[in-house]
Image (cartoon, coloured by chain):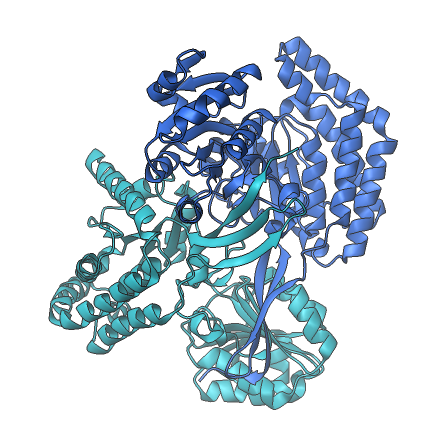
Chain colours: A blue, B cyan
Amino acid sequence: MVRIEEEVLEIAKAAKEAASKLAQVPSDVKNKALLAMADGILSRRDELKEANEKDVRAAEEKGLSAALIDRLTLTDKRIDEMADGLRQIAALPDPVGEITRMWRRPNGLVIGKMRVPIGVIGVIYESRPNVTADAAGLCVKSGNAVILRGGSEAINSNLAIAGILQEAAREAGLPENCIQIIKTTDRRAVMAMLKLDKYIDLIIPRGGKGLIRTVVENSTIPVVRHEEGICHVYVDEFADLEMAINICFNAKVQRPATCNAMETLLVHSKIAPQFLPKMCAKFIEAGVELRGCERTREICPDLDIKPATEEDWRTEYLDLILSIKVVDSLDEAIQHIETYGSHHSDAIVTDSYQNAQRFIREVDSAAVYVNASTRFTDGYQFGLGAEMGISTQKLHCRGPMGLEDLTTEKYIIYGSGQIRE
Amino acid sequence: MVRIEEEVLEIAKAAKEAASKLAQVPSDVKNKALLAMADGILSRRDELKEANEKDVRAAEEKGLSAALIDRLTLTDKRIDEMADGLRQIAALPDPVGEITRMWRRPNGLVIGKMRVPIGVIGVIYESRPNVTADAAGLCVKSGNAVILRGGSEAINSNLAIAGILQEAAREAGLPENCIQIIKTTDRRAVMAMLKLDKYIDLIIPRGGKGLIRTVVENSTIPVVRHEEGICHVYVDEFADLEMAINICFNAKVQRPATCNAMETLLVHSKIAPQFLPKMCAKFIEAGVELRGCERTREICPDLDIKPATEEDWRTEYLDLILSIKVVDSLDEAIQHIETYGSHHSDAIVTDSYQNAQRFIREVDSAAVYVNASTRFTDGYQFGLGAEMGISTQKLHCRGPMGLEDLTTEKYIIYGSGQIRE
């Protein structure tokens, strides 16, 4: 036990040292390293697949679900995508050193805010091995040393990816230890890591509720959470019906397993009789299981709509299932979203200027939409480039967490001898 | 025990409800309320002093130090200042609703970032009762519901201040429970509060190391820490000697008990023989106790300079005591600051463009100065208006925490029917 804690401590100390060096590395060196990392992934493809096969075999032996095994598997396409992701990160602008504001005080002091790396970031994740490359790439680009801790089911794949990245980074001239991975799958390593606030500046947990709760409850290090998305589309009484059908269909069906997919549809009672029969028929045709409130079921008596329970309004299905509720006002819609939602992504479809503005102002979610699908909540779609996930907390950053969100701002002050009176 | 925990839970729930209403209150209503709160403080001065006297008497009976009793005492001047502080907050621009950026995507989506209140903020503080008014004022202005928890030694004063503020706020039309105070001095109330991440969005501890450590170790809620300042001034070999003497003297002597006062002076060895004798004599004349490295003591053999120990470099004196070290290079100075400092405020005095730029870039502190006193690290001095303290952590905000830092940004997206391909 002591040994694991000591190992994690050594890793954290080495990361801290690497971070202060990496913070000073110019963009072109970091970009060169990222491209070398991408090349490494491609040229050592066979090695990766071999390691991945061990994980897949172990998962099959353990009887993991087909979906989990699919997420775990590194196909050629996924290996290509990992390399592409690193190249894309190389192409993004470097946020480090950017002066976001600068102003002059009456006493002549010139004060500015400059983006600098956060320092050492611990990323704790589950399942998909590609996170190893994405997280390392984003951290390197933003000048942060990273400590990776993947799930045990992908340990061989993760170690292989990290090994390739480390070698490429070192050869390209990045400081030793700026990318590290925890080699043991022992959970005590995570617990030890979460207490090292002296060396680690930020923990990003990516995974299920259980993982995130464990991290939040045990970490003395600031955490940026990436939690569930119970997203809503509200079809207002002044909605364009065709637009509403397109948006709702896209928000539910285009990729239902993502956190920005719609889970609950809210419809104004005045428009429900025209809207719901068409909409529901289209959903059912696409294989969506519908669970409606009483009024929804009354409006569509001939369609197969199960009764929705209180539990449905709080459920992130991540599947082709949708709950539907008829409401009598914008207020009721907002109230429902605030009560049952997860403050992730919520949309209104309306042609009313006033209702659009009220929805934007009053819905307290990371992303609030007018007349667009919630599926756009994503770093690439927002134009931020790659993302480290989607923050569902309010501190530090909310919504897609891009490179800028992996930095912090320090004050810089240029004087000419000023002293305080 | 259950009772205290239930009470705190009720307070937190009520705060959450108040927060969603307060977030929608227009600036002029909030400003009117702040002015009414200031008036209340002034018009009920006798009531305040009476409550404060109870605290002072109890402190005297407990044998608290004269300094602590002084901090606790509400003089007429301090009561005036509390009211002034609230008026100044009323005069500041409201950060809520500000759109900090807005851009258009190739698909026509218009995406912006809008400042919104954080929600519910818990402020846990010690000693000075004026924090009750400052914290409540800043939270109200930034649209956040606040839960105050002051130190037991000031409980009567804090309750009296909070009572006046609550009444004024209610009469001015602010939502019920947007300002709440925990009435018990039982520490279990703090412990209960720190676990309520479902209702409280941010904890700000203001006080000694012990308090902050307790909060960090027990909170499941994000924390913004306001910790110690071990601040440095580095006098470079290319410094203007007179400017260096003025800045160092100001940084140490003008108000030594503050977190932005200099605790360690670093001097380049090439300039030390001209600079140190004059500087040290001036410090000694002002009653500053000096603790120097060996070379400092050799350069000033006739002055009373005690030998500095390793412990000195890590000490925040908050008093007229200064440690001094001679270094041989800018690198050594930066290395010392990074090793022993607290990343609060650090300054270089130099006329070298290159050294100034390197210091700005490489010193990883909340405020990095060229040719100015570290004493300027302060919300008012930076032009932010009032401040909630000075954050010494990297997440969310660093340095003086002003009204903007009491908000978070949500994404707002204006579409015209866009769906994701």
Percent from the top left, x then y, of residue A218?
47, 36
Instruction: Single out the residue that lies furthest toward the right.
Output: A43
B256 or B375, nearer to the observer: B375
Quadrant the C terminus of chain B occupies: top right
> In the displayed structure, does residue B231 sit left or right of residue A154?
left
Percent from the top left, x then y, of residue A174?
78, 50
B203 or B344, nearer to the observer: B203
Which residue does the image show at 54% across and 81% down from the upper left?
Answer: B248
Percent from the top left, x then y, of residue A328?
32, 33
Figure quadrant of residue B70: bottom left
Question: Taking A258 as reference, is B387 above or below it?
Answer: below
> In the displayed structure, does residue A29 sit left or right of residue A284?
right
A182 or A74, nearer to the observer: A74
Quadrant the N terminus of chain B occupies: top left
Figure quadrant of residue A40: top right
B116 or A172, nearer to the observer: B116
Question: Taking B334 as reference, is B253 above or below it?
Answer: below
> In the displayed structure, does residue B40 sit left or right of residue B307?
left
Residue A308 showing in the rendered view: no
